[in-house]
Image: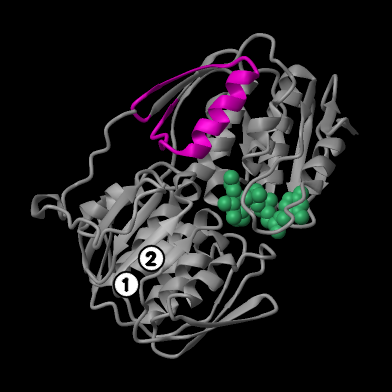
Amino acid sequence: MKFMLTGGRPLKGSVDVSGAKNAVLPIMAAAMLTGDEVVLEDVPDLLDVTTMRGVLEMMGARIERAGHSLRIQAPAVLDIEAPYELISKMRASIVIMGPVLRRAGHIRIPPPGGCAIGSRPINWHLKGLEALGARITMDHGFLDARAERLRGARIYLDFPSVGATENIMMAAVCAEGDTILENAAQEPEIVDLANFLNEMGGRIRGAGTSVIQIKGVKTLTGTTHCIIPDRIEAGSFILMAAACGGDVLVRNVIPAHLASLLAKLQEMGVSFQEEDDGIRIWGDGRLRAVDIKTQTHPGFPTDLQAPALALLTRAEGTSVITETVFENRFMHVEELRRMGADIRIEGRSAIVCGQERLSAATLTASDLRAGAALVLAALTAEGTSEIRNVHHIDRGYEGMELKLRGLGAAIRRAPDGEQPGGEAAAPAAAERGARLCLLPR
Ligand code: UD1
């Protein structure tokens, strides 16, 4: 599928942010730690959630979705071989390793795939699990991890990896004795996972700081948990509103999760205000250039680098955007250049000279956040852009085109084969500014 998007309209109205993709994926995996039923609320309807569901079902879990809630029941005996077809689609599926290893004592899993944004090894996941007592070998293309018992340990991560922190927490929560995880990731999704595990009976302290202390417990029980809002989706809509001008209220946001983005918006001269039910952004779309360096939380999130870069292509002055978390995460730059953006790459930095205008083009999304960057650029460009490979966007944004149409954007989803037929349909007046209501699927 592709998006047909005619740029140049201000965005107006309000948009509701969905539950966080990066929180729900490890929490779904953590549901394998108990044989009791777990109920998750505010679960976004995303391709990645469907992939994780498929992985867990292949391992024997029973899962039902009703609207935005998910009921998960792991079986008494887990199937310990993770399916290659699904694991290779999504890197985040590696987080099943810790919980399945703990529950079943054995897991066979192929090294995962995912977005094309660097080599993305999993050495720190494996090192952490080995420190807890796992024996891990490579066998016919599968990682084979075994541990009859896991024992608490003191583990120092060379880098605060999000996935490694999650895997270690999930393996250690029911290990014998205490685990101290140093230089842990501090992302809000780590805190949501720790809260979930504690609601199940775990004893985890310090999540959200660089030292996490885990007192091993014998068993965990079922619980009901509401997933935190997606700060990256919220940030993407905030950046789109800043790019297009107009007046947008982004609802279901935790502003503290977006502090680094809001600080940069202030530097750019974007008008925004925290309100009771969200963040309101307004203005005429004119911005000043700023420098951005991606970092682990609470620094500027790498997942907002691509849309922020796209926004700065039209700011007044020169911006330097430095990517420190991933190698090879500037795949959107070539596509933005085709729209007339003036960007050059020097090592890990992109130097962006702001232009007055971008022009529409046929574009290809190379990964999830690059896709969001192209949508942002197309929203401001003159003419109708065609954005291909929308499946990347569907991995992490629930109904992005529906939400944007609710704000007055002229965007629609079309089959790949459809010939360009002029402008994308403008939304009906009543649809503009309307609160988006997604039908449960
Ligand atoms: C998670 C997020 C992703 C986000 C990233 C950084 C999920 C599902 N995905 O990904 O959206 O962009 O955090 O905030 O939550 N690394 C190693 N060895 C390892 C692990 C990581 O070298 O064992 C490297 C990676 O290649 C990368 C960096 O560390 O360069 C950060 O990776 P990590 O924090 O682990 O990100 P993910 O958990 O994969």
Work out whether residue 374 can be spotted.
yes
**Residue visible at 49% across and 63% down?**
304
Q: Residue at x 82, y 26 (%)?
A: 150
Residue sticking out furthest to the left? 430
**Can you say whether 27 is above or below 242 in the image?**
above
Badge number at residue 400: none
Q: Residue 331: x percent and y percent?
A: 59, 66
Q: Callout 1, which amino acid?
A: Thr
Q: Residues within 10 Å of mark 1 (few under 14, many from 20)?
A: many
Does the residue at mark 2 contact the one at mark 1 (Cβ under 8 Å)?
A: yes
In the displayed orientation, state which residue is furthest to the top: 76
Image position, residue 125 (x, y; %): 77, 43
Under circle 2, the secondary element is: helix
Residue 251 seen in render: no
Question: Is 302 displayed left or right of 12 in the figure?
Answer: right
Q: Position of residue 161 (x, y in %)?
A: 69, 52
Q: Quadrant of residue 219?
A: top right
Give the x, y percent position of residue 241.
30, 66
Label 1 secondary element? helix
In the rendering, which numbered label is found on residue 376? 2
* Cα gap from disc 2 to disc 1, whole angstroms: 7 Å
Image: magenta residue range: 40-68
Please tell me how crowded label 2 is: few (under 14), some (14-19), or many (20+) other residues with Cα within 10 Å.
many
- Image quarter where the C terminus lies is top left
Most foreground residue, 229 or 120: 120
Q: Which mark is residue 380?
A: 1
Label 2 sits on what residue type?
A: Leu
In the image, what residue occupies the spot 67% across and 65% down?
328
Residue sitting nearer the eye, 234 or 364: 364
Q: Residue furthest bottom?
A: 317
Out of 345 and 361, give the one closest to the viewer.
Answer: 361
